[in-house]
Image (cartoon, helix red, strand yellow):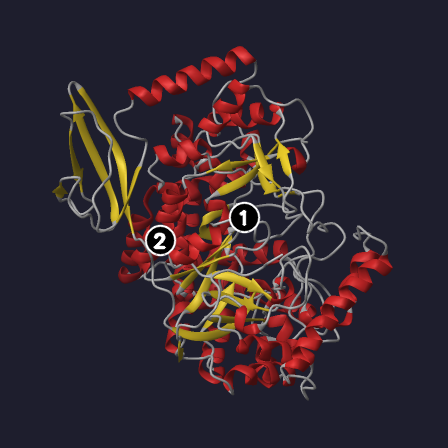
């Protein structure tokens, strides 16, 4: 039972009417009733007063009355090629205004797009967004493999202290041409919050709509070559300081320091921004600004205001907290030069993203770049300011207690409000999806289960006192598929952890690839494990890999060092001998499976043998965590340890912890051994055949 009193009948009905779960089942199959005060808090964040039993009954009556009086739902979703299914009063008429300017009746087969539905019944008129979405998107036709990276960690000797988009283009070009890789999957490149970064996680961005300009290579901006005089000397000084920092990182003397990198790049880029642009460059910038529209204006305005008032917009002067207020409009004029600068930054970042994808495709990659969409945004960031009407205030996204984290998780990010998204026709969601897909061959959606439901945690309460809130999955998933259809990209859903029954099957049926990680692939699921899942029984339509950025590297997992690290940091939930015994049993089970398949002994070691195991699976995409290929034993991120472990600040290193520059990767013996697993086998460019495999996996 959750803490607090149980809800009465009216509160339960009101909660369910708004998609708020009044009970749920844990990963162990145990039923939990959600406390009344949790339901009240969640409803309040959606503008519903249920603070007393009387208020809840009034709200329920009002909801029923509104539903009865509504001619059309807030948003209508239909499958492309089919007619709209509507429940209209007798004699009502409806028509569809198509996205391309045409018009048709609701019974006509609809093309994919964001249309508008109009209805008339007696004296009543209603209008609603109409989303015509694909029933399914294509999955990749050819099997391929690629590296999984966090870009900041892949430094070249030309970097400015962290990996950048020029490094990405080089990595893609080399791995595609020399190794036959079909993709490079990235961590999120979303824009970070300004100011200090106590937790530099790329999964807690300020904006998911725009990429962060700290990934720009300054020397690759065309205007850089025309710097002269004092401007040239100033930028050269920034470059010298950045290269000195870069050398210290590559010597292992310091960690990646985003704040210093960002300060140096801004100092240099402000000088580059002042260089007059050619007529063609001016036209390209103007076209970018026109294409991005109000979203770019809002983002650039927030950046300019944050430079003056700090990044926490809730503490700004009252008139500036609403992006549509007259005071913000005035401030935009007062800060016009700063707004223009941040628009320009977004443009040059977009240009270098496009260059990196072109390099990947020119190298022969079937997919190219796989961008990553984080599950949410920081509560004080640009998106939270711009989209505050679509986000639930006083709430945070997280996860309920489970075997992976007995205390549950609070990610500190405000969730979408289902009602507000529907009222907007899901345009805010479509916009950030479109941005993430623009220069990509595929998009990875973090915590893809959030399209169906999210765990909401009231601020100030532990994650265990949250509840699930449901979304219109047909609409959320439909928007994802519509944007993927428009962009011609594949979609990979990160579906690890607690996954509601039927979700994986629905995603697979719609063409969304899943994610299978070797550590979690066991017979029998999270309870009653009976050994590793045989390779032939892994999912076909998925990205298969050995580990992720949130898990130990494979070398550390094999040696047991991951348990030693967690013990040193006081993170173990059981006695150390028990943890070590379980870790050893899991490792030994996998090694026995490798022996059974005659993959051990392997002259190149157990890590290589485990990658060879991946090639025995039917999985469509095979991913190699780059630190695994270099023998790195340190986790890029150890969840819950922001103050005691250098999360998100480590360069890719070898087995001794020595950083490996991008230029040294081609000759790295361990990386070559791992790559030969794929170049000597069949994965790259192999036509995918139908195989006798189950549709889902038993992930813990």
Q: Residues within 10 Å of mark 1 (few under 14, many from 20)?
A: many
Where is residue 394? Give x, y as percent: 57, 30
Depth check, front residue: 389 or 229: 389
In the displayed structure image, the side of residue 683 where residue 632 appears, left or right: right
Which numbered circle lies on residue 133? none
Does the rendering let one see residue 82?
yes
Residue 246: x and y, percent?
Answer: 64, 68
Regarding mark 2 in the picture, which secondary structure is present there?
helix
Q: Position of residue 440 (x, y in %)?
A: 40, 63
Q: Which residue is mark 2?
A: 481
Q: Please identify the residue farthest to the top as the structure is shown.
A: 54
Viewer-proximal residue among 618 and 303: 618
Taking 446 as reference, is 543 above or below it?
A: below
Residue 349 as seen in the image, left or right of residue 677: left
- Counting labels gives 2
Q: Specify the quadrant that holds the C terminus.
A: bottom right
Q: Which residue is mark 1?
A: 205
Tell me which numbered mark, 2 or 1, is placed earlier along the sequence: 1
Going 40% across and 20% down the picture, which residue do you hit?
A: 63
- Is the residue 515 above or below the residue 410 in the image? below
Instruction: Depth check: give the residue in front, 46 or 468.
Output: 468
Asked whether residue 564 appears in the rendered view, the answer is: no
Q: Are marks 2 and 1 in contact (CB under 8 Å)?
A: no
The residue depicted at 43 percent of the width and 44 percent of the height is 300
The crowd level at tag 2 (other Cα within 10 Å; few <14, some 14-19, many 20+) is many
Q: Is residue 423 above or below residue 197?
A: above
Which quarter of the picture shows residue 72?
top left
Horizontal and vertical percent position of residue 356: 43, 68
């Amino acid at each position: 039972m959750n803490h607090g009193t149980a809800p009465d009948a009216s509160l339960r009905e009101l909660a369910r009417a708004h998609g708020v779960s009044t009970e749920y089942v844990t990963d162990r199959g145990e039923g939990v009733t959600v406390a009344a005060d949790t339901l009240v808090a969640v409803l309040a964040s959606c503008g519903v007063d249920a603070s007393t039993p009387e208020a809840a009954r009034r709200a329920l009556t009002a909801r029923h009355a509104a539903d009865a009086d509504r001619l059309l739902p807030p948003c209508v979703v239909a499958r492309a090629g089919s007619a709209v299914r509507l429940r209209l009063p007798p004699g009502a008429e409806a028509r569809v205004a198509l996205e391309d300017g045409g018009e048709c009746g609701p019974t006509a087969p609809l093309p994919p797009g964001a249309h508008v539905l109009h209805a008339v019944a007696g004296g009543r008129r209603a209008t609603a967004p109409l989303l015509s979405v694909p029933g399914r998107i294509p999955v990749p036709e050819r099997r391929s493999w690629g590296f999984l990276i966090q870009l900041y960690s892949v430094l070249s000797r030309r970097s400015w202290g962290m990996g950048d988009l020029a490094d990405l283009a080089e990595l893609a070009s080399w791995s595609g041409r020399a190794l036959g890789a079909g993709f490079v999957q990235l961590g999120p490149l979303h824009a970070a919050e300004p100011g200090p970064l106590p937790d530099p996680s790329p999964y807690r961005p300020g904006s998911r709509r725009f990429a962060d300009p700290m990934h720009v290579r300054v020397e690759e901006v065309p205007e850089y070559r025309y710097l002269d005089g004092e401007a040239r000397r100033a930028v050269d000084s920034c470059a010298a300081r950045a290269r000195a920092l870069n050398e210290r990182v590559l010597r292992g003397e310091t960690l990646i320091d985003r704040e210093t990198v960002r300060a140096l790049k801004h100092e240099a880029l402000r000088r580059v921004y002042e260089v007059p642009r050619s007529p063609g460059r001016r036209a390209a910038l103007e076209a970018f600004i026109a294409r991005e529209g109000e979203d770019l204006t809002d983002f650039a305005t927030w950046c300019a205001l944050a430079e003056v008032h700090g990044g926490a917009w809730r503490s700004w002067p009252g008139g500036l907290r609403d992006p549509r207020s007259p005071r913000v409009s005035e401030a935009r004029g007062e800060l016009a030069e700063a707004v223009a600068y941040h628009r320009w930054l977004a443009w040059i970042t977009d240009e270098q993203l496009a260059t990196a994808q072109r390099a990947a495709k020119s190298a022969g990659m079937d997919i190219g770049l796989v961008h990553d969409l984080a599950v949410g945004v920081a509560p004080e960031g640009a998106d939270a300011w711009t989209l505050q009407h679509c986000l639930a205030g006083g709430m945070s996204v997280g996860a309920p207690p489970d075997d992976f984290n007995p205390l549950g998780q609070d990610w500190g990010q405000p969730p979408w409000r289902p009602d507000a998204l529907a009222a907007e026709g899901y345009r805010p969601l479509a916009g950030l999806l479109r941005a993430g897909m623009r220069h990509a061959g595929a998009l990875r959606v973090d915590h893809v289960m959030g399209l169906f439901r999210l765990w909401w945690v009231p601020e100030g309460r532990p994650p265990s006192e949250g509840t699930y809130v449901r979304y219109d999955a047909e609409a959320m998933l439909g928007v994802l598929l519509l944007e993927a259809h428009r962009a011609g990209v594949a979609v990979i859903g990160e579906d690890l952890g607690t996954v509601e029954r039927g979700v994986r099957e629905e995603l697979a049926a719609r063409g969304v690839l899943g994610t299978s990680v070797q550590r979690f692939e066991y017979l029998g699921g999270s309870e009653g494990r009976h050994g590793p899942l045989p390779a032939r029984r892994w999912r076909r339509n998925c990205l298969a890999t050995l580990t992720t950025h949130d898990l130990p590297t494979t070398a550390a997992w094999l040696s047991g060092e991951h348990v030693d690290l967690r013990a040193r940091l006081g993170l173990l939930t059981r006695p150390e001998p028990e943890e070590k015994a379980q870790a050893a049993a899991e490792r030994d089970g996998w090694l026995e499976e490798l022996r059974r398949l005659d993959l051990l002994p392997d002259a190149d070691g157990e890590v290589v043998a485990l990658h060879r195991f991946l090639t025995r699976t039917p999985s469509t995409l095979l991913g190699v965590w780059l630190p695994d290929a270099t023998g790195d034993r340190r986790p890029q991120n150890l969840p819950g340890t922001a103050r005691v472990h250098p999360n998100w600040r480590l360069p890719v290193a070898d087995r001794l912890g020595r950083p490996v520059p991008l230029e040294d990767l081609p000759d790295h013996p361990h990386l070559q051994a791992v790559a030969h697993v794929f170049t000597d086998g069949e994965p790259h460019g192999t036509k995918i055949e139908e195989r006798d495999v189950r549709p889902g996996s038993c992930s813990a």
